[in-house]
Amino acid sequence: MVIVMESEKRKALEAAGWRFGDAADFLGMNEQERQLLDARVEMALAVRRLREALNLSQKQLAARIKTSQPRIAKIEQAASDVSLDQILRAFAAVGGRIVVKQVGRSHATKAAPEPAAVGGKRPKTNKKLQVAEVQIELIGAEL
């Protein structure tokens, strides 16, 4: 539920030191974390819409992907203990398709260093990764 506030009232509150934001602001999420959260929620909602359009119960969908009904409920809520892989498997099981398109040129970048091992020494890395900007499209999510 979104509540719209009059702009004059909002300006007065901001002048008094109040700040406005969303849950991601409250949690201090960066742009990448916001995008991942938005993608998880959109896919989870699409799973539910497609499942309902097929007149499938959560239990029937669970049988399709060899999991439990409570797990499907968590998938549809985009619960934090549900992996992106599980959401994608459920999405595919109800007829959704995922299209990944490269939209930018790929370029090489240095790999992130591996975490320090016990004893505090980091292994040296000279690995190069190919990185490209991609666009992910959910086919069937628009129901």
Image (cartoon, helix red, strand yellow):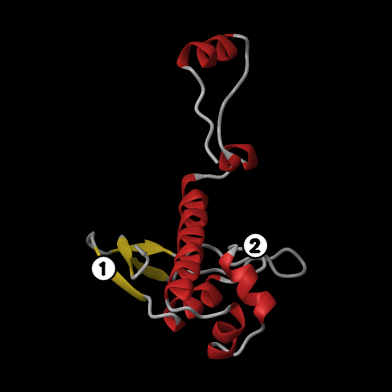
Residue 80 tag number:
2
Question: Which residue lies at the image location 44% right of the left edge and 80% below the top edge?
Answer: 94
In terms of secondary structure, where does tag 2 sit? loop
Quadrant location of the N terminus in the rendered image: top right
**1 relative to 73, above or below:** above
> Mark 1, mark 2: which one is toward the viewer?
2
Pinpoint residue 12: horizontal percent, then vertical percent: 55, 9
Disc 1 residue type (three-letter): Lys
**Is residue 132 in view from this perspective?**
no
Q: Is residue 14 left or right of residue 38?
A: right
**62 relative to 82, above or below:** below
Question: Which residue lies at the image location 43% right of the left edge and 78% below the top edge?
Answer: 54
Pinpoint residue 131: horizontal percent, then vertical percent: 34, 64
As rendered, which of 121 and 110 lies closer to the eye?
110
Pinpoint residue 124: horizontal percent, then vertical percent: 55, 68
Could you tell me how far apart the alpha carbons at marks 1 and 2 are, in whole angstroms? 27 Å
Q: Name the residue under label 1.
A: 101
Question: Where is residue 69, by image quadrant?
Answer: bottom right
Pinpoint residue 6: horizontal percent, then vertical percent: 49, 17
Question: Where is residue 140, by image quadrant?
Answer: bottom left
Disc 2 residue type (three-letter): Ser
**33 relative to 122, above or below:** above
**45 relative to 57, above or below:** above
